[in-house]
Amino acid sequence: MAAVVAFCVISIGEPAGEVPAVVHGRAAHEAHGQGPLRAGAAKVRIPLGERPVIAGYPGHRRASGPGEEVFVRALALEAGGGRALIATIDTLLIPGELEEEILRRANLGPQTCLMLAATHTHSGPGGAWNNFLAGWAGSGAFDRSQRDDIAQAASMALTLAIGLTAPAELAVAREEWPRGPARARSDGPVDPALVAVELRRFNGQDVAALLSYSMHPTTVPRSELRISGDWPARAEKYLLEGPALVLQGAGGNATWDGADPARPVALEALRILAGVKALAKVSLACETRLIALPEARASLRVPWIFRRAAGNVLALGFEKHAVQTRIHLGPLSLVGVPGEAVGGLGLRARPDILVSLADGYFGYVETTERWERGEGESGKTYFGPDLSRALGLTPR
Protein backbone atom coordinates (compact mmCIF):
# COMPACT_ATOMS: atom_id res chain seq x y z
CA MET A 1 0.00 0.00 0.00
CA ALA A 2 2.83 2.37 0.86
CA ALA A 3 4.41 1.71 -2.54
CA VAL A 4 1.15 2.61 -4.29
CA VAL A 5 0.84 5.83 -2.33
CA ALA A 6 4.46 6.73 -3.10
CA PHE A 7 3.91 6.09 -6.82
CA CYS A 8 0.96 8.51 -6.74
CA VAL A 9 2.78 11.36 -4.96
CA ILE A 10 6.50 11.07 -5.79
CA SER A 11 7.78 11.79 -9.29
CA ILE A 12 9.97 9.08 -10.79
CA GLY A 13 10.34 10.94 -14.07
CA GLU A 14 13.41 13.07 -14.55
CA PRO A 15 14.59 15.13 -17.51
CA ALA A 16 16.89 13.14 -19.77
CA GLY A 17 20.56 13.31 -19.00
CA GLU A 18 23.45 13.36 -21.44
CA VAL A 19 22.47 12.38 -24.96
CA PRO A 20 24.11 9.09 -26.04
CA ALA A 21 26.15 8.90 -29.23
CA VAL A 22 23.53 6.73 -30.97
CA VAL A 23 19.73 6.78 -30.57
CA HIS A 24 17.57 4.28 -32.47
CA GLY A 25 20.52 3.48 -34.71
CA ARG A 26 21.07 7.15 -35.56
CA ALA A 27 23.94 9.51 -34.76
CA ALA A 28 24.02 13.30 -34.87
CA HIS A 29 25.17 14.27 -38.33
CA GLU A 30 25.17 17.07 -40.90
CA ALA A 31 25.69 16.72 -44.64
CA HIS A 32 25.61 19.22 -47.48
CA GLY A 33 25.86 18.98 -51.24
CA GLN A 34 25.07 20.99 -54.32
CA GLY A 35 25.02 19.92 -57.94
CA PRO A 36 23.17 17.78 -60.48
CA LEU A 37 20.28 15.89 -58.90
CA ARG A 38 20.10 12.11 -58.88
CA ALA A 39 17.02 10.29 -57.64
CA GLY A 40 15.65 6.79 -57.30
CA ALA A 41 12.42 5.43 -55.86
CA ALA A 42 10.89 2.09 -54.94
CA LYS A 43 7.65 0.64 -53.58
CA VAL A 44 7.60 -2.68 -51.71
CA ARG A 45 4.52 -4.50 -50.43
CA ILE A 46 4.39 -5.41 -46.74
CA PRO A 47 3.47 -9.12 -46.49
CA LEU A 48 0.79 -9.83 -43.92
CA GLY A 49 -0.70 -12.97 -42.42
CA GLU A 50 -4.34 -13.98 -42.43
CA ARG A 51 -5.31 -11.93 -39.36
CA PRO A 52 -2.73 -9.15 -38.97
CA VAL A 53 -2.56 -6.83 -35.97
CA ILE A 54 -4.21 -3.48 -36.73
CA ALA A 55 -2.95 -0.22 -35.25
CA GLY A 56 -4.98 2.94 -34.86
CA TYR A 57 -7.24 2.73 -31.81
CA PRO A 58 -6.98 1.64 -28.17
CA GLY A 59 -7.15 -2.05 -27.42
CA HIS A 60 -5.75 -5.07 -29.20
CA ARG A 61 -7.35 -5.54 -32.62
CA ARG A 62 -6.77 -8.02 -35.40
CA ALA A 63 -8.13 -7.84 -38.92
CA SER A 64 -10.81 -10.28 -40.01
CA GLY A 65 -8.75 -10.81 -43.19
CA PRO A 66 -5.68 -9.41 -44.96
CA GLY A 67 -7.64 -6.50 -46.50
CA GLU A 68 -5.94 -4.09 -48.90
CA GLU A 69 -2.28 -4.30 -49.76
CA VAL A 70 -0.05 -1.87 -47.86
CA PHE A 71 3.40 -0.68 -48.79
CA VAL A 72 6.66 1.01 -47.96
CA ARG A 73 7.64 3.73 -50.42
CA ALA A 74 11.19 5.04 -50.50
CA LEU A 75 12.99 7.89 -52.21
CA ALA A 76 16.76 8.34 -52.53
CA LEU A 77 18.15 11.79 -53.37
CA GLU A 78 21.73 12.73 -54.18
CA ALA A 79 23.43 16.02 -55.10
CA GLY A 80 27.05 17.10 -54.91
CA GLY A 81 28.10 14.06 -52.89
CA GLY A 82 25.28 14.43 -50.35
CA ARG A 83 22.50 11.86 -49.94
CA ALA A 84 19.12 11.98 -48.24
CA LEU A 85 16.57 9.19 -47.92
CA ILE A 86 12.84 9.64 -47.34
CA ALA A 87 10.53 6.69 -46.76
CA THR A 88 6.90 6.27 -45.77
CA ILE A 89 5.26 3.22 -44.25
CA ASP A 90 1.53 2.50 -44.39
CA THR A 91 1.21 2.27 -40.62
CA LEU A 92 0.15 4.34 -37.61
CA LEU A 93 3.54 5.37 -36.23
CA ILE A 94 7.26 4.59 -36.28
CA PRO A 95 8.64 3.23 -33.00
CA GLY A 96 12.33 3.93 -32.54
CA GLU A 97 13.07 0.21 -32.29
CA LEU A 98 11.45 -0.34 -35.71
CA GLU A 99 13.64 2.32 -37.31
CA GLU A 100 16.73 0.75 -35.73
CA GLU A 101 15.77 -2.67 -37.13
CA ILE A 102 15.21 -1.19 -40.60
CA LEU A 103 18.63 0.46 -40.60
CA ARG A 104 20.25 -2.80 -39.51
CA ARG A 105 18.55 -4.85 -42.22
CA ALA A 106 19.37 -2.27 -44.91
CA ASN A 107 23.00 -2.10 -43.74
CA LEU A 108 22.74 1.67 -43.28
CA GLY A 109 25.11 3.21 -40.73
CA PRO A 110 24.33 5.66 -37.91
CA GLN A 111 25.21 8.67 -40.04
CA THR A 112 22.60 7.85 -42.67
CA CYS A 113 20.35 10.79 -43.52
CA LEU A 114 16.89 9.24 -43.30
CA MET A 115 13.44 10.68 -42.69
CA LEU A 116 11.29 7.63 -41.97
CA ALA A 117 7.64 8.57 -41.56
CA ALA A 118 4.34 6.82 -41.01
CA THR A 119 1.41 7.74 -43.24
CA HIS A 120 -0.56 7.48 -39.97
CA THR A 121 -3.34 5.32 -41.36
CA HIS A 122 -5.54 4.19 -38.48
CA SER A 123 -6.22 0.92 -40.30
CA GLY A 124 -2.68 -0.15 -41.08
CA PRO A 125 -0.53 -2.98 -39.74
CA GLY A 126 0.64 -2.52 -36.17
CA GLY A 127 2.35 -4.71 -33.61
CA ALA A 128 5.77 -3.18 -34.30
CA TRP A 129 6.37 -1.68 -30.85
CA ASN A 130 7.41 -3.93 -28.01
CA ASN A 131 5.78 -1.70 -25.42
CA PHE A 132 2.79 -2.82 -23.35
CA LEU A 133 1.45 0.70 -22.77
CA ALA A 134 1.81 1.75 -26.41
CA GLY A 135 0.24 -1.52 -27.57
CA TRP A 136 -2.95 -0.90 -25.62
CA ALA A 137 -2.98 2.81 -26.46
CA GLY A 138 -3.16 2.20 -30.20
CA SER A 139 -0.05 0.65 -31.75
CA GLY A 140 -1.41 -2.89 -31.38
CA ALA A 141 -0.19 -5.95 -29.49
CA PHE A 142 3.46 -6.60 -30.24
CA ASP A 143 3.91 -9.20 -32.96
CA ARG A 144 7.59 -9.88 -33.70
CA SER A 145 6.89 -11.62 -36.98
CA GLN A 146 4.77 -8.73 -38.27
CA ARG A 147 7.36 -6.22 -37.05
CA ASP A 148 10.06 -8.10 -38.95
CA ASP A 149 7.96 -8.18 -42.11
CA ILE A 150 7.48 -4.40 -41.96
CA ALA A 151 11.19 -3.88 -41.32
CA GLN A 152 12.20 -6.17 -44.17
CA ALA A 153 9.89 -4.44 -46.65
CA ALA A 154 11.28 -1.05 -45.60
CA SER A 155 14.89 -2.18 -45.89
CA MET A 156 14.20 -3.59 -49.36
CA ALA A 157 12.52 -0.36 -50.49
CA LEU A 158 15.43 1.76 -49.28
CA THR A 159 18.03 -0.53 -50.87
CA LEU A 160 16.17 -0.57 -54.18
CA ALA A 161 15.72 3.22 -54.21
CA ILE A 162 19.43 3.76 -53.62
CA GLY A 163 20.28 1.31 -56.39
CA LEU A 164 17.95 3.07 -58.85
CA THR A 165 19.42 6.57 -58.45
CA ALA A 166 20.03 8.27 -61.78
CA PRO A 167 19.96 11.82 -63.15
CA ALA A 168 16.63 13.52 -62.53
CA GLU A 169 14.94 16.88 -62.22
CA LEU A 170 12.79 18.28 -59.44
CA ALA A 171 9.59 20.33 -59.44
CA VAL A 172 8.24 21.73 -56.16
CA ALA A 173 4.91 23.50 -55.68
CA ARG A 174 3.18 24.69 -52.53
CA GLU A 175 0.15 26.72 -51.62
CA GLU A 176 -1.98 27.71 -48.67
CA TRP A 177 -5.22 25.78 -49.30
CA PRO A 178 -7.83 26.77 -46.70
CA ARG A 179 -10.63 25.35 -48.88
CA GLY A 180 -9.16 21.85 -48.77
CA PRO A 181 -10.90 18.95 -47.01
CA ALA A 182 -8.93 19.27 -43.73
CA ARG A 183 -11.02 20.48 -40.80
CA ALA A 184 -10.15 21.28 -37.18
CA ARG A 185 -11.32 18.71 -34.64
CA SER A 186 -10.30 20.73 -31.57
CA ASP A 187 -9.23 24.24 -30.58
CA GLY A 188 -6.62 25.83 -32.78
CA PRO A 189 -6.07 26.42 -36.48
CA VAL A 190 -5.56 23.79 -39.14
CA ASP A 191 -2.34 24.00 -41.14
CA PRO A 192 -3.62 24.55 -44.71
CA ALA A 193 -0.29 24.01 -46.49
CA LEU A 194 -0.28 21.65 -49.46
CA VAL A 195 3.16 20.70 -50.81
CA ALA A 196 3.60 18.72 -54.01
CA VAL A 197 6.88 17.42 -55.41
CA GLU A 198 7.51 15.68 -58.74
CA LEU A 199 10.74 13.90 -59.62
CA ARG A 200 11.24 12.82 -63.22
CA ARG A 201 13.87 11.73 -65.70
CA PHE A 202 14.96 14.05 -68.48
CA ASN A 203 12.93 11.97 -70.96
CA GLY A 204 9.77 12.80 -68.98
CA GLN A 205 9.47 9.46 -67.15
CA ASP A 206 8.18 9.88 -63.60
CA VAL A 207 10.41 8.74 -60.77
CA ALA A 208 8.19 9.54 -57.81
CA ALA A 209 5.81 12.05 -56.30
CA LEU A 210 5.87 13.43 -52.78
CA LEU A 211 2.95 15.14 -51.12
CA SER A 212 2.52 16.75 -47.70
CA TYR A 213 -0.88 17.63 -46.25
CA SER A 214 -2.19 17.84 -42.69
CA MET A 215 -5.23 15.57 -42.30
CA HIS A 216 -5.80 12.49 -40.14
CA PRO A 217 -6.21 9.23 -42.16
CA THR A 218 -9.33 7.95 -40.39
CA THR A 219 -11.75 7.53 -43.30
CA VAL A 220 -12.03 3.75 -42.71
CA PRO A 221 -14.49 3.27 -39.82
CA ARG A 222 -13.03 1.91 -36.62
CA SER A 223 -15.61 -0.89 -36.68
CA GLU A 224 -14.26 -2.26 -39.97
CA LEU A 225 -11.53 -4.68 -38.98
CA ARG A 226 -9.64 -4.55 -42.24
CA ILE A 227 -6.20 -3.37 -43.32
CA SER A 228 -6.14 -0.18 -45.37
CA GLY A 229 -3.67 2.55 -46.26
CA ASP A 230 -6.59 5.02 -45.98
CA TRP A 231 -6.56 8.27 -47.95
CA PRO A 232 -2.74 8.54 -48.34
CA ALA A 233 -2.72 5.22 -50.22
CA ARG A 234 -5.78 6.12 -52.31
CA ALA A 235 -4.23 9.45 -53.31
CA GLU A 236 -1.50 7.57 -55.19
CA LYS A 237 -3.87 6.38 -57.91
CA TYR A 238 -4.73 9.98 -58.83
CA LEU A 239 -1.12 11.14 -58.92
CA LEU A 240 1.73 10.62 -61.37
CA GLU A 241 3.29 7.28 -62.30
CA GLY A 242 5.75 5.89 -59.80
CA PRO A 243 5.60 5.67 -56.01
CA ALA A 244 3.77 8.51 -54.25
CA LEU A 245 5.03 9.30 -50.76
CA VAL A 246 2.38 11.04 -48.65
CA LEU A 247 3.67 12.81 -45.56
CA GLN A 248 1.52 13.92 -42.66
CA GLY A 249 2.11 17.58 -41.97
CA ALA A 250 1.10 19.31 -38.77
CA GLY A 251 -2.20 17.45 -38.61
CA GLY A 252 -2.45 16.57 -34.94
CA ASN A 253 -5.71 18.54 -34.63
CA ALA A 254 -6.98 18.00 -38.18
CA THR A 255 -9.71 15.66 -39.33
CA TRP A 256 -11.34 15.51 -42.78
CA ASP A 257 -14.49 16.41 -44.64
CA GLY A 258 -16.01 14.87 -47.75
CA ALA A 259 -16.67 11.38 -49.08
CA ASP A 260 -13.19 10.79 -50.50
CA PRO A 261 -10.65 13.39 -49.36
CA ALA A 262 -7.87 11.60 -51.27
CA ARG A 263 -9.15 12.69 -54.67
CA PRO A 264 -9.33 16.47 -54.13
CA VAL A 265 -5.94 16.49 -52.38
CA ALA A 266 -4.25 14.61 -55.23
CA LEU A 267 -5.93 16.64 -57.97
CA GLU A 268 -5.03 19.92 -56.28
CA ALA A 269 -1.43 18.72 -56.00
CA LEU A 270 -1.35 18.04 -59.74
CA ARG A 271 -2.90 21.43 -60.45
CA ILE A 272 -0.28 23.41 -58.55
CA LEU A 273 2.51 21.33 -60.10
CA ALA A 274 1.37 22.14 -63.63
CA GLY A 275 3.72 24.61 -65.22
CA VAL A 276 6.26 24.64 -62.39
CA LYS A 277 9.79 24.92 -63.73
CA ALA A 278 11.87 21.84 -62.94
CA LEU A 279 15.37 22.04 -61.49
CA ALA A 280 18.22 19.78 -62.60
CA LYS A 281 20.75 21.19 -60.13
CA VAL A 282 19.85 21.58 -56.48
CA SER A 283 21.25 22.14 -53.04
CA LEU A 284 20.77 19.24 -50.63
CA ALA A 285 21.34 19.39 -46.89
CA CYS A 286 20.46 17.09 -44.04
CA GLU A 287 20.75 17.46 -40.28
CA THR A 288 20.12 14.67 -37.78
CA ARG A 289 19.66 15.88 -34.20
CA LEU A 290 19.59 13.74 -31.07
CA ILE A 291 17.36 15.36 -28.46
CA ALA A 292 17.09 15.01 -24.71
CA LEU A 293 13.39 14.97 -23.88
CA PRO A 294 11.82 16.91 -21.02
CA GLU A 295 10.24 15.25 -18.02
CA ALA A 296 7.13 13.20 -18.81
CA ARG A 297 4.06 15.09 -17.62
CA ALA A 298 0.40 14.20 -17.53
CA SER A 299 -2.03 16.66 -19.07
CA LEU A 300 -3.79 19.27 -16.94
CA ARG A 301 -6.99 17.54 -17.99
CA VAL A 302 -6.08 14.65 -15.70
CA PRO A 303 -7.61 15.28 -12.25
CA TRP A 304 -4.87 16.64 -10.00
CA ILE A 305 -5.15 13.76 -7.55
CA PHE A 306 -4.14 11.30 -10.31
CA ARG A 307 -1.76 13.57 -12.22
CA ARG A 308 1.47 12.44 -10.56
CA ALA A 309 0.64 8.75 -11.00
CA ALA A 310 -0.24 9.34 -14.66
CA GLY A 311 3.06 11.15 -15.18
CA ASN A 312 4.93 8.26 -13.60
CA VAL A 313 3.20 5.77 -15.92
CA LEU A 314 4.30 7.88 -18.89
CA ALA A 315 7.86 8.05 -17.55
CA LEU A 316 7.96 4.25 -17.41
CA GLY A 317 6.52 3.84 -20.90
CA PHE A 318 8.72 6.15 -22.96
CA GLU A 319 12.40 6.59 -23.70
CA LYS A 320 14.27 9.75 -22.80
CA HIS A 321 15.86 10.63 -26.15
CA ALA A 322 14.50 11.32 -29.61
CA VAL A 323 15.73 11.69 -33.19
CA GLN A 324 14.84 14.64 -35.39
CA THR A 325 15.72 14.88 -39.08
CA ARG A 326 15.72 18.04 -41.18
CA ILE A 327 16.08 17.86 -44.95
CA HIS A 328 16.54 20.81 -47.30
CA LEU A 329 16.04 20.03 -50.99
CA GLY A 330 16.22 23.03 -53.27
CA PRO A 331 13.31 25.30 -52.24
CA LEU A 332 11.83 22.68 -49.92
CA SER A 333 12.61 22.38 -46.20
CA LEU A 334 11.17 19.43 -44.25
CA VAL A 335 11.39 19.23 -40.45
CA GLY A 336 10.65 15.86 -38.90
CA VAL A 337 8.56 15.64 -35.73
CA PRO A 338 8.63 12.35 -33.75
CA GLY A 339 5.00 12.84 -32.77
CA GLU A 340 1.85 14.63 -33.90
CA ALA A 341 2.31 18.37 -34.26
CA VAL A 342 -0.78 20.58 -34.28
CA GLY A 343 -1.64 23.13 -36.95
CA GLY A 344 -0.58 26.11 -34.87
CA LEU A 345 2.98 24.78 -34.80
CA GLY A 346 2.90 24.18 -38.55
CA LEU A 347 1.91 27.79 -39.16
CA ARG A 348 4.62 28.98 -36.79
CA ALA A 349 7.29 26.94 -38.63
CA ARG A 350 6.84 28.66 -41.99
CA PRO A 351 8.57 28.49 -44.45
CA ASP A 352 9.59 25.06 -43.14
CA ILE A 353 7.10 22.22 -43.51
CA LEU A 354 6.62 19.99 -40.48
CA VAL A 355 6.46 16.23 -41.07
CA SER A 356 4.68 14.49 -38.21
CA LEU A 357 5.12 10.83 -37.25
CA ALA A 358 8.78 10.86 -38.37
CA ASP A 359 11.65 8.91 -36.75
CA GLY A 360 9.90 7.96 -33.53
CA TYR A 361 6.75 8.68 -31.54
CA PHE A 362 6.40 10.72 -28.35
CA GLY A 363 2.74 11.68 -28.47
CA TYR A 364 1.05 14.90 -29.50
CA VAL A 365 2.94 18.18 -29.69
CA GLU A 366 0.68 21.06 -28.68
CA THR A 367 1.55 24.75 -28.47
CA THR A 368 2.75 25.82 -25.02
CA GLU A 369 -0.06 28.33 -24.58
CA ARG A 370 -2.84 25.84 -25.37
CA TRP A 371 -1.25 23.20 -23.17
CA GLU A 372 -1.15 25.59 -20.24
CA ARG A 373 -4.87 26.31 -20.73
CA GLY A 374 -5.73 22.63 -21.17
CA GLU A 375 -7.03 23.29 -24.70
CA GLY A 376 -6.62 21.71 -28.13
CA GLU A 377 -4.86 18.35 -28.12
CA SER A 378 -3.17 18.93 -24.76
CA GLY A 379 -5.04 15.98 -23.25
CA LYS A 380 -3.09 13.63 -25.53
CA THR A 381 0.38 14.95 -24.77
CA TYR A 382 2.99 13.01 -22.81
CA PHE A 383 5.73 15.59 -22.23
CA GLY A 384 3.89 18.77 -21.43
CA PRO A 385 4.64 22.20 -22.92
CA ASP A 386 8.38 21.65 -23.11
CA LEU A 387 8.30 19.09 -25.94
CA SER A 388 7.76 21.71 -28.63
CA ARG A 389 10.72 23.66 -27.22
CA ALA A 390 12.96 20.59 -27.20
CA LEU A 391 12.10 19.95 -30.85
CA GLY A 392 12.85 23.55 -31.80
CA LEU A 393 9.23 24.29 -32.71
CA THR A 394 8.73 26.93 -30.00
CA PRO A 395 11.29 29.58 -28.94
CA ARG A 396 12.98 28.74 -25.65
Image (tube, rainbow, N blue to C red):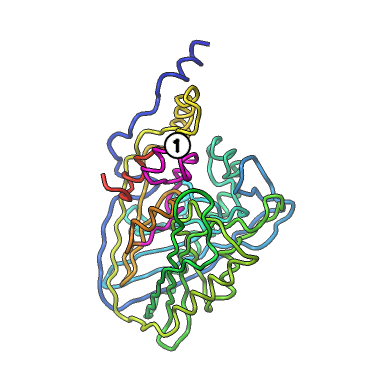
Q: Is residue 323 left or right of residue 313?
A: left
Looking at the rendering, the stretch of residues picked out in magenta corresponds to 353-381
Q: Is residue 71 left or right of residue 250?
A: right
**Image quadrant in which you'd find residue 29:** bottom left
Q: Which residue is mark 1?
A: 318
* 169 relative to 159, above or below: below
> In the rendered picture of this protein, how many numbered marks are placed on residues?
1
Q: Residue furthest right?
A: 64
**Magenta-span inclusion, residue 362:** yes
Q: Residue furthest top?
A: 2
The three-letter amino acid code for the residue at tag 1 is Phe
**Image quadrant in which you'd find residue 197:** bottom left
In x, y percent, where is residue 317?
48, 34
Q: Nearer the viewer, residue 120 or 344?
A: 344
Q: Nearer the viewer, residue 170 or 166?
A: 170
User: Which residue is located at x 45 percent, y 27 percent?
Assistant: 312
User: Which residue is located at x 53 percent, y 78 percent?
Assistant: 241
Q: Secondary structure at mark 1?
A: loop
User: Which residue is located at x 48 percent, y 51 percent?
Assistant: 252
In x, y percent, where is residue 60?
65, 41
Q: Residue furthest bottom?
A: 203
In x, y percent, where is residue 233?
58, 65
In x, y percent, where is residue 97?
46, 45
User: Which residue is located at x 46 percent, y 34 percent?
Assistant: 299
Disc 1 crowd, CA 10 A, few/some/many (<14, 14-19, 20+): some
**Magenta-span inclusion, residue 378:** yes
Quadrant for the C terminus, please: top left
